[in-house]
Amino acid sequence: MNPHWLGLPGQGTAMVGIVLASHSAKLADGVAELASQMAGPDVALVAAGGLDQPGRPLGTDAALIADAIDRAWGDDGVLVLMDLGSAVLSAELAVELLPDERRSKVLLCEAPLVEGAVAAAVAARLGEPLSAVAAEARGGLAGKAAQLGTASSLPPAAAAALAEPAKPEADGTVELRLVIRNPLGLHARPAARFVQTAGRFDATTTAENLTMHTGPASARSLNGVATLGVLQGHEILVRASGRQAEQVLRALRDLAERNFDEPAAAGTIPAQSIPAQSTPAGTAAEVTGPPGAGAVLSGIGASPGIATGDAVHLRSARIVVPREPAADATAELARLDAALAATEREVRAARDRVASRPDRSYEAAIFDAHLLFLADEALLAPARRRIKEGANAADAWDTAVTEAAAAWRQLTDPYQRERVRDLEGIRSQVLTALLGTAREPGALRERPARTGIIVAAELTPADTASLDPAAVSGIATAYGGPASHAAILARALGIPAVLGLGPAVLSIPEGTPLLLDGRSGTLMVAPARADLATARQKAAHAARAADSASRLAAEPAVTVDGTRIEVAANAGSADDVRRAVAAGADGIGLLRTEFVFLTAASMPTEDEQAAVYADIAEILRDRPLIIRTLDVGADKPLPYLLRDAEPNPALGQRGIRLGLAMPGLLRAQVRAILRVAARHPVKLMFPMVTTADEVRAALDIVGDARRSLAAAGVLVPAEGAMETGIMIEVPAAALCAPGLADAVDFFSVGTNDLTQYTMAVDRELASVAGLGDAIHPAVLALIGRAAAAAAAAGRWTGVCGELAADPLAVPLLLGLGVRELSVNAGAVAAVKAAVRATDLAAARELARQAVGLPSAESVRELVRRAAGTG
């Protein structure tokens, strides 16, 4: 590869250069040949197609495009034309790799690749400036359209290219383009914030999804914005006109830069996720005979915990919407307004109930979207129009909501389709206010003396928020999924819940004793007394143990025989770090730096990264901080760094593999970490390491970065002062650990991926999820091998995967030689308690026996017996 791709000076010409970026090397070469035939050999036309690998396979390569930009460099700049998809993102990354003085003279153009290249090449040959060459490229389809007589039917983007670009329209309309970074796109909460922000300004504002060609829709309409189907990585076009047009675009841009105020972990749902069942609103589910005593129904574990209690049905009265016309439109409009106001009071009360609980402002914001539904002109305008045409208020409202819900159901994203449930919940609330229907027999808060398990077809967020955890021990529903807002609120309220149990749950008689396990997703009907007694004892014991552990959470975790074990926390944001400190964590054993990149509109600079890491180190107040370098790839793409599709992303270019493939990206992050490590107890860790060659290459980058910073007068840690480690996630790394231990200061075992690769199990696939148990003897054997190799070399080993947070596994891990455990903040207290109950000599014998067992379940049984709980 030409070394100039990193930004070393190219030859330079007296005209604009052109780069052609395509997934296909043959296509890029062919277009370059065609354009050169049209314009002559003097124009610098450089093809950048395919991947920089033998045979130039299909794909796009940022480094290859950057090299092409350098070879096409002209004094008047370079125009880059791209075919589609990741070619655009790779081109954007290529520009980021250029020196600052060159970036401003590179223009990425949306023109058609073939026709645009020909038109641009001719303009460049005539000596036109970059802007004129780009304009010619954008108009490349004009000749073809005119010849075919279809100029009037040009696609909007092509038609717009024929006009003067980037100028405000005569009526003062201004535009803004945004790439959405949220993991779940503009789902209910960010869409609500978008609408709320647009509604604060005196401007007419619309939004359009350029990626999916949907819209435009009013930016003041939640339904309008949500049904654009905006997902992560989609580009939207916002147009505004009016007195505060520029202000509203600035506010929306700032909102997007803040990631729509979404927390880093927003949008995550339990790993046990199966497609949610649904039933049309207002219809009865088909019910067979009731399940017998001892029957176990399986559903989706939506909120963990064990619950016992009698079945208490929460049924909605069947809503029959009258279709008769009304004689007095004014009276019907007043009825609708009164019902909307009453529903608004209910929603605000539900919001306040959730917000009053500690650290639940995010969950409470669910109701902001509901409040916007009640003021959404996309619902109110058609409802009021129908009333004026003679419909009664209930009929008009029901029809308006039904039509809006149909648009939501057309969305391709299952999470966004799930929001139909919220809309239908608001539909029912308003109809209830209009028609006087209500829940039967009433919420449990009306009968606080009884403790029971709510049984329902579904729960709306308002239903869930109204439940009193002191009176409701659990929730069991026939329908719904783990991404539903009812599930989110159940977790926030600490109520165990199992959803998607199917219609059979609705046939369970009122008052039937139930045993619900919100972690495994099961509901036992009429359990035997022994089962109930055992469950109650376990729940009571768990509550007492949790209370005791929380009181000692900030104290050191020391084993029975006096060995201190560091119990740190995993974090993916500054807020996570604050929670970890409050939970008593000894430090941060894994800082997932992906959040820095996911919340940035473009590749974060070294200075930007250093500022974030320094802020986190300050929060920790001299507690240790292990920073893991970027762990993304085809399985976890960045919006501006999407990779070409891989047949099996888990086995593709991710973690350190991607970092070494893009050394400029890795070098910037390492430099930022070194700058912070000069003043704080920071350790550096590389993910997804497989071979010793990868370790050597990564450490070379660290050494180069340290020397270059020192040469520039930047304070860095002394040689050897900053510990550097690797993650053991690949079986090959565990098996070859003796050859890796000498090169690094520590190992950190990522049991999630190690289990996936060892057991050949896709951890997201429910049908084989049972095989992916990290406590399996094969996984334990690999952990033990790595820990033994580290100890022999005088190094230490930690575990930062989910297994570390399982108190049952703690003695096994310590017995295998692990001396640091990094867990989610909520598990710190329980894990420290498990450490304090462990004797290392007994733990070593326990681990020795476990490795020789045939299955994960046999290991769990061994540990239960050893603890006296089997």
Image: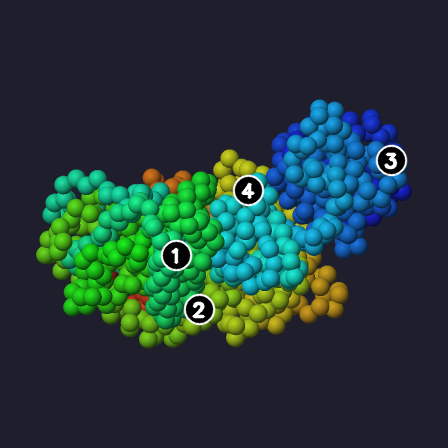
- The type of residue carrying mark 4 is Thr
Say whether disc 4 or disc 3 marks the residue closer to the N-terminus. Answer: 3
Question: Residue 487: percent from the left, percent from the top?
Answer: 34, 55
Question: Residue 143: percent from the left, percent from the top?
Answer: 76, 29
* Residue that label 4 marks: 214
Q: Are marks 1 and 2 in contact (CB under 8 Å)?
A: no
Task: Classify 10 Å Cα crowding around label 3: few (below 14), some (14-19), many (20 and above).
Answer: many
Q: Are marks 4 and 2 in contact (CB under 8 Å)?
A: no
Task: Classify 10 Å Cα crowding around label 4: few (below 14), some (14-19), many (20 and above).
Answer: some
Which residue sits furthest front? 327
Name the quadrant containing residue 488: bottom left
Q: Is residue 690 left or right of residue 302?
A: right
Q: Is residue 870 left or right of residue 86?
A: left
* Residue that label 1 marks: 330
* Residue that label 3 marks: 125
Q: Mark 1 and mark 2: span between their CA atoms? A: 54 Å
Say whether disc 3 or disc 2 marks the residue closer to the N-terminus. Answer: 3
